[in-house]
Every structure is written in C-alpha cells, then in structure tokens.
C-alpha cells in the first residue's frame, strides 16, 4: 500500500510538472507485490510535493563530450551526470562561474525515456536504484589527474544518487581532491547521497552537498560557491560610464594588472572632465606602472596618461600613453554622446 501511495505521489507530482514527458506512463501498480517493496522506495522521503522541475525527454550526449573538454592546467573540474538536462544546465553555470573544466559521465548504455519511467518498478532505473550493487558501465573515462577540486553533480533518483555515480566514484581516486556534491531533483533534498558516495569513493575530502532546482540562478550559485570557500567565482574588470556598462577588451600588461588590483578592493570611481573635445581624463589617485609609447588614440581607446590619469577617448589625439584597453561595443557617435559632457564618472568594478 505504501508503495502504491509513493508511486502515485511521484506520478502525479512529476507528471504535473513534466507534461508531455516520457515519464507520464500509466504507473503500473500491482498491489499483490506490495509486500516485496524494495528498501530504497520504502525509505524515499517523498513527503513534500514534487516541485519545479521540467523532466525533459532524455538528451543523448554529444559524441566525445566529457573527457575531451578537460584541461589539466585547470585545478577545478565539474563532473556531471544528467539524464534529462537539468543537472547539466546547473553544471554548465558552475563551470562558467568558477572557470572550471566540465566533464560528463556518460553511460555505456544510454538511459531511454522508458528507462526513466519511475512509475513502473520494472524499468531499468527502478531496478538499478533498488539494487545497491548495481554499477552501470561508463562509456568513457574521465581523468581527475591534476585537479584539486571536483564539483560532482547528479539528479536525485528515488532519494539517492543514480547508481552510475557509484560506478564513477569507485573507479577513481580522490586523494588530494576536495569533492563538492550538488544535485537537482523534483523536490527531494540531497539527503545522504553525498555521504554515501564519499563512503564508496573511500578517498578525498567530501564537503556537504546541496540540492538546486534546474532553474537555479547564477546569483544563487555564485553565493553557494563563495560559501563553500574552496573556489572563488572568477571576476573580471568591468567599466561603467555614468552608471552605464561598456564592454572593454583590456590589454594584458602590468598597468591593467595594477588597475585590477585597485578595483579588487572596491569599486574605483574616477571623476573625469572633458578635455580638448576628444577625451575624458581624470586622476586614478595613485601611480600605476607605465610603459608609454607615442600613439594616435582613437574613439574607445582607454589609456594611462602621465602614469596616474585615466583617459577615455571619444575623439582622437596623438601623445605618449600606455594602452589599457578599448571599448568594443559603442560607435564613435555613441561614445561622443556618453563622454562628451563634462563631469563624467568612470567606475571600475571587479565582478
Ligand atoms: C527515475 C527517476 C527517479 C526520480 N526520483 C526523484 C526523487 O526521489 N525525488 C525527486 O524530487 N525527484 C526525483 N526525480 C526527478 C529528478 O530528480 C529531476 O527531474 C532532476 O532534475 C533530473 O535531472 P536531470 O535532468 O539532470 O537528469 C526522479 C526522476 C527520475 C527519472
């Protein structure tokens, strides 16, 4: 009876938020089998209404996805298993925020829509999740060599990590690696899934994991990444003119590094004044390393003048400057409109 109730709850709630998905199968329930309930389903903490996920049709992985994307120079790796795309989407955001590499756990035998039908206890996922010894094969290996931090993502299946995660963690050494589990689900929390995987791995430093909805925003993920304090979200130097952000291609030189360091301790607001009908110029407040060369600045050029003045051009002028960067998303006319008036504030922010 308990099984019947749980299956009904799963079917109604997940089908409601996954209209049209292949998981809307009739949900075969045979009350004569109720006594033989698999332990996993009995333990499944499905008390809250299943929530906000779109259980999409399974997306076949692209050929070669996964290990190919790895760059052993990077110390952070996001490893994800995702049958219908939700966790993959979250993994991609985490990788973008941390500057990490991304690798996908791909099953040797892909999960079909029928396999993912949790309403039927005879489907592949039901059988696997109810068999603690099930170890679905991996299509290819993912090397952890050179990585010191691994974000490990997966969907929750019947209150647990899919068994293929066990295959993955048992076939890798996590020595010297900090592992941060994360998952997506209809509504279930991450539960003990991280601890179970840690025990199966038998190595590595495993942090408390966290569950996200597939629709989680970058802001929420950024905050979580900051909280874990293992990896800081990557930031870069942004430039605002009177509060309007402009895209800048920054030079790679000591002056820009020094400017970046200044902005890292808080937004750097520089009061500038229009000069000569071609530039806005204002004091940075400190001297930066300089390597002046004679050049003819063009609209959009950002330069260092005299080692301690920031200049943004909306016209042209020839002088000895150190190049800092160039505004790339404004026409000369737009730059003139933005910068032509006196009393401009140019703000540099790390974000
Ligand atoms: C076989 C199966 C079992 C599931 N079990 C649960 C569950 O116990 N609790 C829950 O909240 N969601 C459950 N879900 C929903 C998934 O966790 C959710 O849709 C997840 O975001 C899918 O991630 P993916 O798109 O990366 O595969 C289950 C889905 C499937 C296919």
Image (cartoon, rainbow, N blue to C red):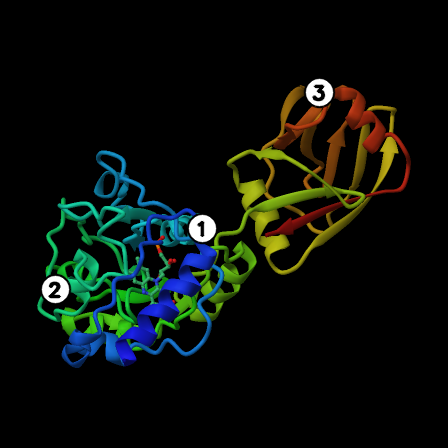
Tell me the distance, in whole angstroms, between the alpha carbons under discs 1 and 3.
55 Å
Most foreground residue, 191 or 171 = 191
Q: Earlier in the sequence, mark 1 or mark 3?
A: 1
Q: Image check: 56 left or right of 216?
A: left
Q: Which of marks 2 and 3 is nearer the N terminus?
A: 2
Which mark, residue 170?
Answer: 2
Mark 3 lies on a secondary structure that is loop
Q: In the image, residue 15 lies at what x, y percent?
A: 41, 57
Which mark, residue 154?
Answer: none
Mark 1 nearby-residue class (10 Å; few <14, some 14–19, many ≥20): few
- Give ligand 1's quarter of the image: bottom left
Reading the image, the residue beneath label 3 is 298
| Residue reaching furthest to the right | 342
Reading the image, the residue beneath label 1 is 19
Tell me the distance, in whole angstroms, between the alpha carbons under discs 1 and 2.
36 Å
Most foreground residue, 281 or 345 = 345
Mark 1 lies on a secondary structure that is loop
Q: In the rendered view, tell whether residue 207 sits above or below residue 74.
A: below
Q: Earlier in the sequence, mark 1 or mark 2?
A: 1
């Amino acid at each position: 009876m308990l099984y019947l109730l749980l299956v009904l709850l799963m079917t109604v709630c997940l089908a409601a938020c996954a209209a049209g998905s292949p998981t809307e199968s009739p949900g075969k329930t045979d009350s004569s089998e109720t006594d033989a309930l698999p332990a996993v389903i009995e333990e499944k903490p499905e008390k809250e209404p299943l929530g906000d996920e779109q259980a999409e049709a399974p997306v076949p992985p692209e050929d070669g996805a996964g290990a190919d994307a790895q760059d052993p120079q990077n110390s952070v790796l996001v490893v994800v298993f995702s049958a219908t795309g939700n966790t993959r989407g979250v993994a991609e955001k985490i990788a973008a925020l941390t500057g990490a590499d991304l690798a996908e756990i791909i099953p040797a035998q892909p999960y079909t829509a029928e396999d993912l039908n949790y309403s039927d206890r005879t489907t592949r996922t039901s059988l696997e999740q109810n068999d603690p010894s099930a170890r679905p094969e991996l299509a290819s290996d993912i090397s952890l060599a050179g990585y010191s931090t691994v974000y490990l993502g997966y969907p929750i299946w019947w209150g647990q990590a899919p068994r293929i995660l066990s295959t993955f963690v048992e076939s890798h050494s996590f020595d010297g690696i900090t592992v941060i589990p994360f998952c997506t689900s209809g509504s279930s929390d991450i539960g003990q899934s991280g601890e179970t995987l840690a025990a199966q791995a038998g190595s590595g430093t495993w942090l408390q994991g966290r569950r996200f909805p597939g629709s989680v925003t970058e802001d929420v993920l950024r905050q979580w990444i900051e909280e874990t304090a293992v990896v800081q979200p990557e930031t870069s130097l942004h430039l605002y003119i009177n509060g309007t952000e402009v895209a800048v291609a920054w030079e790679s030189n000591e002056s820009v590094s020094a400017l970046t360091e200044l902005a890292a301790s808080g937004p750097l607001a520089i009061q500038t004044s229009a000069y000569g009908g071609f530039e806005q110029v204002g004091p940075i407040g400190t001297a930066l390393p300089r390597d002046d060369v004679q050049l003819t600045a063009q609209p959009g050029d950002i330069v260092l003048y005299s080692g301690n003045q920031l200049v943004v051009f909306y016209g042209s002028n020839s002088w000895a400057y150190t190049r800092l960067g160039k505004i790339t998303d404004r026409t000369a006319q737009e730059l003139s409109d933005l910068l032509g008036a006196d009393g401009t504030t140019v703000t540099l922010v790390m974000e």
